[in-house]
Image: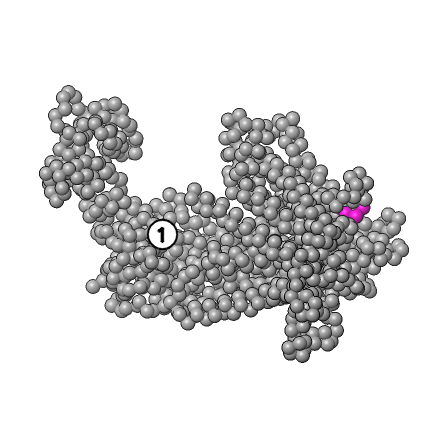
Amino acid sequence: MAVTAKPGRKIGGTVLRWVVLVVLGFYFVLPLVAMGEFSTRGINNTRSLDSWTGIFSDPDLVDAILTSVELAVLSSVLMLVLLVPTMAWIRLRLPKLGRLVEFLCLLPLTIPAIVLVVGMAPLYAWVNYFLGDSPLTLTFVYAVLVLPFAYRAIDAGLASIDLKTLAEAARSLGASWGTVLWRIVVPNIRTALIGASLLSVALVLGEFTIASLLNFETLQVQVNLIGKRNAGLSIAVSLACLVFAFVLLFLLSYVGQRRRVTVVED
Amino acid sequence: MGYLELKGLRKSFGGQPALDGLDLDLSEGELVSLLGPSGCGKTTALRIVAGFETADTGHVVVAGKDITAVPANRRDMGMVFQAYSLFPNMTAAQNIEFGLRLRKASGPERAKRVDELLELVGLGEFGARYPHQMSGGQQQRVALARALAIQPRVLLLDEPLSALDAKVRVSLRDEIRRIQTELGMTTLFVTHDQEEALAVSDRVGVMSQGKLEQLDSPAVVYREPASAFVAQFVGVTNAVLGKAASGAVRLGTFTLPTDAAAELADGSDVKVIVRPEDIGIVEHKGESNGSLLGSVLTQSFLGPVTRLVVRLDGDEQLVRVDQPSNLAAAYPPGTAVALDFNASRFLVVPA
Amino acid sequence: MVAPVTTSTGGGAAKAATPSRGGGRSGPSTLLAWLVVVPFLAYVGTFLVYPTILVLAGAFQDSDGGFTLSNLTDLMKGVYLQAFWRSIELSAITALLGAVFGALLSWAVATGNPQGLLRRVVVAAAGVLAQFGGVPLAFAFLATVGFQGFVTQFLRDSLGIDLFAGSAWIFDLPGLTLVYTFFQIPLMVIVFLPALDGLRPQWREATESLGGSAWTYWRHVGGPILFSPFLGAVLLLFANAFSAYATAAALVSQGSPIVPLQIRGFLTGEVLLGQENLGKALGLGMVVVVGVAMGIYALLQRRVSKWQ
């Protein structure tokens, strides 16, 4: 930033900065290294990739992974269907409801998942009675769980465009409200929607509390179960999960940036 | 010898030159503007004077003392930034008081000074307000008061008006000029707004690509631009394309009587730079008689003058011509006209 | 999962919107306008509000559904009260540790290039650990300092130090404290980095041109400005640790030192007769603690947003 005229101070700051980065970097990288080491242990101090290849040969785990991926997709879709029309409509026609919807969407932040699941248990007795006890019914809770994150992403997207004017322009050209939503709102907040979806996917893939206490075998639940008999395998999957989520978020940082660049060029 | 001297300042950022040998002298009590498009180096020059950047080569001298190596916090420069520079956690009065506190002024002395300064910038009632409770214009007044509180040797203004509404901008710039004159404060003012620079400065330095193109009084910079860049950056101007013809300039069938193109090869492309108010206009009837002919395309009313856009016959170039509004009615759109360039008021440059 | 509350852009924009839109008053069109919102409200009502009310109301009911305060009075004693204190202790300690080290890390990142690789990597990694860590974090912890962990083995084999000489501490509060810092520090980075980015370079330069040093700047300008965001972040981290379940659940399979694990006990059937609703009372207690922390956090946020 500003070039200071006091070299001594600047060097002091730089040294402290690197000390912080190196020490904390070590603190956070150490467990990752440990996971890598642990998950490649073989018999008698040899190295082996059995834990890693085991990921694909354990049928329960593969099932759980598939279930979690399906859940992630379904929850993202349900979240988008619920939120996008509602949030756009509220900005356009019912601004008075803005506060209420915001409150509802952010509510899961104050209700810990462990508390929510207490109230979910009786509700899921009904859900499973009507829809069977497929783990995919978790979609209903997960769509609620991702609300705060998705709400913020979409809200930021909607705030960055002049929704009212765009909608009025489209309406004056003869577009129906459906067309406005599909052809005007969605394309213009595309990056926000991608962001909201990626966050939801990551959140669902990492969710443990509710799935485990409602007795559904999702990825994280399986990882935890397997850990009791085969720590190496669980640690390998855990490392894979962390790395996968990291890649997802890392890419997300570029998605956000591309939008900023276009804004500047405007 | 000037009170503030910038000597041979050079600075580049990552290989890109921002300042390419800038020399500038300000006499005591003088207000000099640095004017130019963004990236011309004007802000870099100001920040070097303030001590926020260090020049690669060159010196900054104040009252005969070289301060190039003095850190920013011991330079006694009053700086007003573009916007949002007030400390948000302090009231207007506390902001103004801050520099005095650092100088260990006594409580009563500080209070007296703060009152004077709030009065000076016309915000007597606003001492207890926080920045977020004030308008942009009021914030900039407080920022000015804060910079003046430490009785700086030089006042540095870094586009202090550019974030404000047009109306506030005009009233505040006049206010700044009044205060600056009252206090006799040597001031360096950086702006990209030519109207602003012309209105408040003793002298204006027009910068381009890290260099001063021209440094002179506002009237001279406007009336006698030293280069095409200055002419086009300051005020409204036409650049009419033509060809050099034995020292003179041919515009279509018309020959502009001048020797300004004497050093240019015959037939080479040239631009005639001329201000709209320096072009005469008469209604033209009948045969072509070797004058510059065209027809009026549009009229726009600008208050005291009306601007006519004239399309030249032949190559269809558009030329802006200003006429006093009471005379302009004689040239409704479609009128065939002949244009007359006032010989002393144009510039011929290679295109 | 707890995460930062941004100030309500939705509410702000809502205020700006003019209420005089065409059809705003006419009956049928208003009714239709409301219909669009019904699916969302119905859904959130069913899957968020209803279960929440079930918990909160259940806290005041006995096993036959009659009103009682005995669940709540039970919370105030014995293992439950201890669990609350332990939860609060764990959350407070990890919130402070997370806030201090997270603030340092944020500062180290904020002083670098905003588009740089370092910042992207740190922010993405912080996002993973803060919000999606859960069970994998518990296993990362075991792989590092578990009985057969990387560090445990290294210390034992190379330096002759036994990490577990005292006790199986990693499955109790000290272990939880350590593993919680792995998501508390990253959460602090996510929450605090925007506050640091909000410090304008002009403030530092203005301080300098008025004669101040770096110390003056932090003492009078930077520090006071960051005080509210820092305090808010501590509260947020507290609420986050207090609500966290997955990591602790994966790590601690026996005993229930903290409230979330107590609730697990009620859900997995370790319930004494006549105490079915005690789990809901624990839930109510958690909601109250988290709600208070988040409420103060939201108030602080409002004050912060004025300054930027």
Front-most of residues B185 and A57: A57
Q: Is residue B141 above or below residue C209?
A: above
- Quarter of the C terminus of chain A within the rendering: top left
Q: Residues within 10 Å of mark 1 (few under 14, many from 20)?
A: some
Q: Position of residue C177 (x, y in %)?
A: 68, 66
Front-most of residues C10 and C19: C10
- Where, by quadrant of the figure, is residue B332 drawn? top left
Q: Residue furthest bottom?
A: C160
Q: How many marks?
A: 1
Name which residue lies at 61% across and 36% down: A85
Name which residue lies at 67% across and 70% down: A45
Q: Residue furthest top?
A: B286
Q: Is residue C274 above or below residue A87?
A: below
Q: Position of residue C173 (x, y in %)?
A: 72, 67
Q: Is residue A154 above or below residue B322?
A: below
Q: Main secondary structure of the magenta part?
A: helix
* Residue A206 horizontal side relative to residue C222, left or right: right
Residue interval drawn in magenta: A119-123
